[in-house]
Image (cartoon, grey):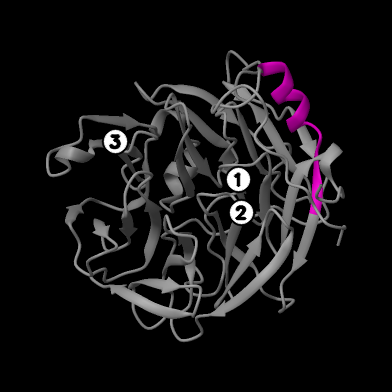
Amino acid sequence: MAGPVTVPPPPPGGPQGPTTQKTSEVISKFRTAKNFRLAKAEASVTSLDFDDSGEFVLAACDDDSIQLYNAKEGRHVKELLSQKYGVHLARFTHHSSSIIYASTKVDDGIRYLSTHDNQFLRYFKGHTDEVTSLTLCPSSDTFLSCSRDDTIRLWDLKSQSPQARLNLLTPYLAAYDPSATVIAIASAATHTILLYDLRNYDKPPFTTFDVRPYMSQQSIKSGKPDWTRLEFSNDGKSVLLGTNSAAGHLLLDAYDGTLRAHCVRSQQAMNLRTAPGSNEHRGQGSRGQGDVCFTSDGRFLIGGSGDNKDAIVWDTQGQVEIETKHLRPMCSLPGKSKTSVVEWNPRYNMCATADREVVFWVPDEHVGLRPP
């Protein structure tokens, strides 16, 4: 591993990020700063999450462990075990010392855990099949869960009973918009993304995006979900639908659902993680939260290249091919391990990727510098 790491603050340009030129220069110079191998050689990371402060990062692993890292200092903090219940989709609450995660064994409950003393604070029970998505509200202690039992449930951390329930066909993924007033729910079986007003969640969606025209025929005919991530950009103008499809990820307009670009990988994608909700290898560690995410300014996407060891970057303001709507990667970021899961730090100019190990990335000029 490299020496101590100074994590750079957000680049200039306000809360949405740096100026166009500066952002492009910085993002193309990202390099690996720290690599953390998992204790078990055969183990893999299935989800990553940064806390609100950007100081800590959480990795859920398919060996039933939760790894906690200090991203600012570049060190491993502790390991928490969930051998009885399994673990996936580990998420920080708005308090860095408490997390929620989905069970992969025994039942399909959601567990609320204190990382300080490794004690459960609450159990959220009700789902009768695998939980495929957990997303915390940006502005309150509520969160959404999607499940293969064809329900979405709205929970409050203070109560073990759901605050609301929606019945939908295969609601695999959910996301809050930055204002926390709209929720998007992706249904792979119906090839739609439904947008609800959170204040009127008991009413029908106020708009529905049909993404079937943007999907490959192979994906439609397979009948298997290959959607892996749903995310709004921080400016609220775009929606990212991460996929395992050879056609790449879908970048959609958040207002009308039109396709802005197919963000294609640099090579044919192979050996990708099973999408949420897939029947294959339940509890075997093949699941993942998606290998692509937005940067903080909403302009760039960072993701896995599919089969090699490089991460790749798309510039959403780059040149899109007119006929195919393909958007090619702007650059690759050379690494030493595969990128199966990726997460951007919400407070600092860095990101984390993972597969068999957890890797921290920062701009090149900051790698290896000692804290002042």
Q: Which residues are magenta?
A: 20-33
Residue 76 position, x and y percent, is 70, 68
Q: Residue at x 61, y 76 (%)?
A: 79
Residue 182 appears left or right of 138: left
Q: Label 2: few (<14), some or many (≥20) within 10 Å?
A: some
Which labelled disc corresponds to residue 293? none
Q: Residue furthest bottom?
A: 84
Up-down relation of residue 56 to residue 80 (above or below): above
Q: Which residue is mark 2?
A: 55
Residue 341 position, x and y percent, is 61, 54
Quote the CA–CA distance across marks 1 and 3. 23 Å
Q: Do labels 1 and 3 touch, CB within 8 Å? A: no
Quote the CA–CA distance across marks 1 and 2. 9 Å
Residue 42 appears left or right of 197: right
**Magenta stretch: residue 48 in it?**
no
Mark toward the start of the polypeptide (1 vs 3): 3
Residue 257 appears left or right of 2: left
Residue flagged by tag 2: what amino acid is it?
Glu
Q: Which residue is mark 3?
A: 182
Q: Residue at x 17, y 55 (%)?
A: 164
Mark nearest the camera among 1 and 3 is 1
SS at circle 2: loop
Q: Of 221 and 59, which appears nearest the observer?
A: 59
SS at circle 1: loop
Q: Which residue is mark 1?
A: 345
Up-down relation of residue 105 to residue 227 (above or below): below
Residue 45 position, x and y percent, is 62, 65
Q: Residue at x 86, y 62 (%)?
A: 1
Residue flagged by tag 3: what amino acid is it?
Val
Mark toward the start of the polypeptide (3 vs 2): 2
